[in-house]
Image (tube, helix red, strand yellow):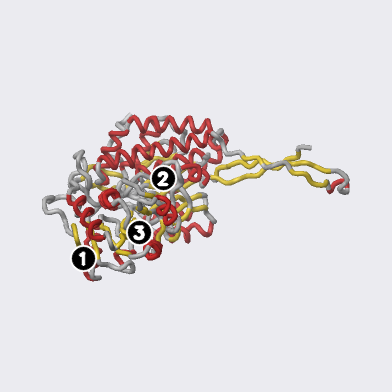
Amino acid sequence: MDNPMRKEYEHVFINNEWVANSSGQSIDVVNPATEEVIGRAPLAGIAECELAIAAARAAYNEGSWRRMGFADRAVVLNRYLDVILARAMDITSIIVQESGHSFGITFSICVKAAIDICRRQLEISREGFDQYTPVVTAPNPLDGYKTTNAQASVVVRKPLGVVAAIVPFNACFMLSLVKSIPALAMGNTVVLKVSEQTPLEGLLLGDLALEADLPAGLLNIITGKPEVGNCLTAHTDVDVVSFTGSDAVGSAIMAQGAPSLKRLLLELGGKSASVVLKDANLKDAAMFGAGNSVAMAGQGCALSTRHIVHNSVIDEYVAKLSRMLWAMPIGNPMVPYTQMGPLISAKQRDRVEQFVALAREEGGKVVTGGRRPSHLEKGFFYEPTIITGLSNSSRVCQEEIFGPVIAVIGFDSEEEAISIANDSQYGLSGAIFSQDRGKAFHLGQQIETGYININPTAVSPDLNAPFGGIKRSGFGREWGEEGLKEFSYQQTLTYPIG
C-alpha cells in the first residue's frame, strides 16, 4: 500500500475506500514556519459529505459493530492504536510541519497523550457499564393486591448512532482520536471532518485504518469548507455532533442541530485564569505561565492567558515570567530545542498584532514581545508577549486571542482574585498557586471553570479525568469514563424475580 505518511491526497476516506472528490477542488498545505507548500489535500463538497454520512449510517444500521461486546470492540480499536503508535514519530513529523507546533509538544501531547487517553477509555469500556438496581417489592395489582411481587432492573449503555466529529487546526490529530475512539468504543460510527488548515494529520488516519483492518464504514474522513460542516450538523442521519472550536460556531451548531434534536458535545473557547497568591512559589507559577504562552504558540483554548497576581509580588512575577519567555527558543519547530513555533497563518498573526495594538490603545504596557522576531524572515512567527496595566474588563482580557499573549492583572484580596477569575464569559481551565495547599484547593473550588490545576509546574492534565467547560466554553465532557458515556444512552430493563 502507499506510504501512510504521504503528503499528497486527492481523495477522501469513505467506507474504507479513497473516494474521488467530485468538486475537483484541492488546497495547498503550507508549512507555517517556512511558508512553503508541503502537500495537497482535497476540498470535499456536499456530495462527499452525503456519501460519508450514508456509509456511516449503513455501517451502524446493518453492520455488526454496535451488536459486538465492549471487549470485542476494544480489541479492534487497540489494534488500530497499535498501528498508530508504531508510526508515532512519522506522524509527529507531519503534524509539526503542518501545524507549526514544537516537536516536543506535538509528540508528548498531540500524539502520545492522545493514544494514552484512548487506551484508558478502552480499558474502562472493557469493564462494561451494566448497573443493577436493588430488589424492590410491591403488591401485585393483578390479583387484587393479595400477593407481593419482587423486581429489579439492569441499566445498560447503548450507542446513539452516527457521530459527526468536527475538529480544529490546533490539535487536529489529537482531537480526531479522542473523539473517534470513544465514539466507536461505545458502538457508534463516525464521520470525521478535519480542518482544511491541517488536513494531512486527519487524512493519514484513513491510511492507518486500512493498515489496521478497521471494519468498513466505521470511520469516514472528509474535509471541506463551512458548508460541509453545516451539512453534518443539520443532517437528519447524524445523531451526535462532537465539536471543538469557537463559541460563535458552537452557537450556530446548536441552532442547526435543534430541528432534529441532536445530542451535542461542545468544547469551545477559553480565557482561563492563573491565580498567583502572595505566598506562591513564583518560579513554578512563572514557569507554568511561560509554558502556557509558548505551547502551540498560544493557540490552545485551555491555556491560561489571564495571570491574576497579588500586587505584593506582581513585579517580581512579571520579571521572572519575562526572563523565562526571553530565553525561550523561537524558530523552526523541526529543530528539537525549539520551544515555540509559528502561528498557523498570516491571518492569525495579523489578528494577534491587532490585539496587541488594541492593548496599547486601552492603556496597557507591553513588557515583553509585542512584535515579530527580527531574526526570522520567513514564517508566521510572533514573540510571546506580556501585557500589564489593563483592567479585566478590557477586550484583551475578555476575548480569546489565540496567540502567545498574556495579560497580567493585579489584585489585593483573595475575594478580588476569585471575582476577577470568574468575570469571564468562558470557563474551561485555569490554575491556582499557593504554598498553602488547603487554601489553594478551597479557592480553586470557587473558580467557575470545568478544569482547575493546583500548583502545576507544566501543562499536564490528568488524562483519566473528564475534561470540558462551562458557560461559553461549552458543555459535555471528553476523556475518561464520562467521555465514553457522552456517546451513549441509558436503557433500563426491569424484570420480575419472584
Q: Nearer the viewer, mark 2 or mark 3?
A: 3
Circle 2: element type: strand
Check disc 3 and give the amino acid type.
Answer: Lys
Question: Quarter of the image holding residue 350?
Answer: bottom left
What amino acid type is highlighted by mark number 1?
Lys
Residue 230 seen anywhere in this rendered image of the structure: no
Lower position in the chain sequence, tag 2 or tag 3: 2
Local SS, label 1: strand
Which mark lies nearer to you, 1 or 2? Answer: 1
Could you classify mark 3 by the number of other residues whose Cα lies within 10 Å: few (under 14), some (14-19), or many (20 or more)? many
The residue that appears at 34% across and 56% down in the rendered structure is: 274
Q: Position of residue 498 (x, y in %)?
A: 79, 37
Q: Which mark's residue is nearer the viewer, 3 or 1? A: 1
Left or right: where 463 falls relative to 35: right
Mark 1, residue position: 365
Residue at the spot x=26%, y=51% of the render? 290
Residue 19: quadrant of the picture = top left
Circles 3, 1 touching at the beta carbon (< 8 Å): no
Mark 1 residue crowding within 10 angstroms, few (<14) / some (14–19) / many (20+): some
Q: CA distance from mark 2 to mark 3?
A: 27 Å
